[in-house]
Image (spheres, grey):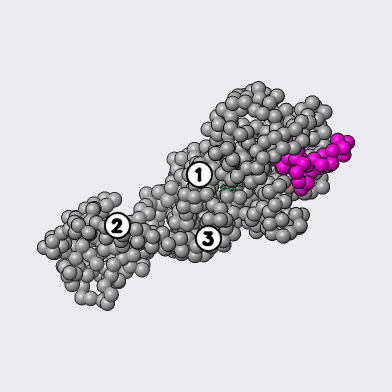
Amino acid sequence: MSCHKSYITTPIYYVNDVAHIGHAYTTIIADTLARYARLIGQDTFFLTGTDEHGQKIEEAAKARGKETQAYADEISKTFKDLWDDFDISYDKFIRTTDADHKKGVQKAFTAMHKKGDIYKDSYQGHYCISCETFFPELQLVDGEFCPDCGKATSVVEEESYFFKLSAYEDKLLAWYDANPDCILPKSKRNEVIRFVEGGLNDLSITRTSFDWGVKLPEDFNDPKHVMYVWLDALMNYLTALGYGTDEKNMDFWPARVHLIGKDILRFHAIYWPAFLMSLDMPLPKHIGAHGWWTRNGEKMSKSKGNVVNPKEVADAYGLENFRYFMLREVPFGGDGDFSQRALIDRINSDLGNDLGNLLNRLIGMSGKYFEGRVESDLVSKYYQAELDEVDASLAKLEPMLFEMQLHRYLEELWRPLTVANKAIDMYQPWTMIKEGKTEETMALNGLIATILAKVSLMLHAVMPQTTSTICEALGFEITPESFEEIIRNGETLAPFTTQKREPLFPRIEEELLVDERQEILKKEKEEKEAKKAAQKEKNKDSKPAEGIALIGIDQFFETSLKIGMVVEAEEVPKSKKLLLLQVDIGEDEPRQVVAGIKEFYSAEELLNTQVCVVANLKPAKLMGMKSEGMLLAAKDKDGLCLIRPEKPKTIGTPIS
Ligand code: ME8
């Protein structure tokens, strides 16, 4: 077993506001990496916490009429409580108001000064409090507004200590050059290089106009200065390990990865390595910058009232489903729009159909044919090709994880599930058992169990509880030892007995969160009104509306519509959308209709219900099956519903 050290960090979050899904996203990625590192036996330290100093926090407290420390305590606790509630496996929750942290920052200041990297001067510049950053006049929008967040900057003129950032330009460029994957995704590295090549100014690292921050070390005898909040904040990655106080965890340094959002890449990829070079400390191995979560294409903000509360989503849809969704939905580094429709689809399809249903199939088959017994010792005798395919996928996974390619990791991890589901459809255990191929059938069940076990082990870091439940059903526990045996050494599963259980991912019907529902209704209303107005305008000259061709009544009657009764209904295997129906429309034989409504109706609920059928369509073939009609339905943002007679009508009644 590997004994590498893995130090994994999130940003420390500002306490000027409560957490939203963006914060949860960073923390969930970091938690996943930390859990995986532990599972493969690495000595892991996972850090998160809160960033509590600076003008922004001081002003936020003032605005709420609170004493700054009390306010910071209150908001910091909301972050900690949320991570505890989310079962985030952090090893330390640091606060920049911790006494040890402050000591460590002061020690670093002294060391940089000794090195000759800090000097005192005066500063005149434009400061954005929201970003806690100075900007040169040239970069301001309209000579006043922050180029990053758009808020008004203020002119600051004060005495300041400076860090000689300009002296590190070449060293930084050399570091990026020698470490092609120091910044992930790699495209982001180019942005940073271009920025540094544009030239770096020395950095003002103290402020005198407020005092909510770490004071300079006493021997500087300069009490009116407090440290720049970014110097203070970045240092948390070292002070959390005991830098400057009790250094017992310093052997975790350098960090394996600092996970951050792309908004704070410059601080982490330029200032932070420069500070570390000044301190003669090794540099982090990776800085992983993910993209931005938006809501309906817009940045989330309180003033817009479109902030998604992670707790609310996790409560509504399940914490682990939410984790899976966030990691699977968006390529790392890219932006993602939060949509509940997409979340529900992932749960119903990837988790419910592909994973949950596979376990159900195994329980069903083993129960029916072998009283629940599953033995895996003959799997390779009959299904070596399937095993090879699965192992080829699994072998690609680990590097993807540590390159932060989590969406690709999960995509690849789903291939073995496809192999398993396909194997059942192809070998048809129900036929094999009839033909007396008991050994092959048992081995097939063993194959399914083996695939479920391997997938669960590799999925454990993303969905810890769910995968533990699956493995419990397969007769073993997820531990670094079982990981080593089953994943690394390819050992065969010990025999076990399955038992009937509740489905892992009950199908979620579309229930929208209230605020999203309201938003949709509002949008729909606006759209309707806009359409109405446009229509009115067009109708003025009584021409037909654009895009709607008017037809005569005869043309309408060319379509034969009839009342039908669904007399048989089943799911089309391997299709996410299709149901295969037999619909009686009063002819000698029922019509076969292949309908794309599986996402909205189960076969069961359609059986013996009436529908409206287009009866004179040319037959078509869908997934190789003949379809001799079409059901009337209406689909909008909330989903699809069938158009049915208000009261039962005689089968075959024409609709006009
Ligand atoms: O920047 N989408 O803290 P912060 C994705 N204290 N991620 C988002 C997001 C969104 N819409 N909004 C926030 C700070 N994040 C500093 C950090 S570290 C030494 C100091 C995430 O509370 C993302 O990780 O503003 C981003 O980098 C972080 O929250 C910013 O959190």
Question: Within the magenta stretch, is there residue 49?
Answer: no
Residue nearer the viewer, 304 or 191: 304
**Crowd rating for badge 1 (residues with CA inside 10 Å; few <14, some 14–19, many 20+):** some
Mark 1 vs 3: CB contact within 8 A: no
* Magenta region: 205-233
Image coords of residue 24 (percent x, y):
60, 51
Give the spatial CA distance, label 2 vs label 3.
40 Å
Q: Which of the marked residues, 2 or 3, is nearer the chain's N terminus?
A: 3
Label 2: element kind:
helix
**Crowd rating for badge 2 (residues with CA inside 10 Å; few <14, some 14–19, many 20+):** few
Image coords of residue 395 (percent x, y):
53, 37
Residue nearer the viewer, 321 or 162: 162
Looking at the rendered structure, the kind of residue marked 2 is: Ala
Give the spatial CA distance, label 1 vs label 2.
34 Å
Q: Which of the marked residues, 1 or 2, is nearer the chain's N terminus?
A: 1
Picture disc at residue 335: 1
Q: Is mark 3 within 8 Å of ligand 1?
A: no
Picture disc at residue 317: 3
Label 3: element kind:
helix
- Which image quadrant: the C terminus? bottom left
Residue nearer the viewer, 87 or 336: 336
Tell me the mark number nearer the camera, choosing from 2 and 3.
2
Q: Residue at x 75, y 54 (%)?
A: 68
Mark 1 vs 2: CB contact within 8 A: no
Q: How many marks?
A: 3
Residue identified by numbered label 2: 534
- Which image quadrant: the N terminus? top right
From the viewer's perspective, is residue 124 above or below residue 320? above
Q: Residue at x 72, y 42 (%)?
A: 229
Q: Is residue 558 left or right of residue 646?
A: left
Looking at the rendered structure, the kind of residue marked 1 is: Asp
Residue nearer the viewer, 534 or 115: 534
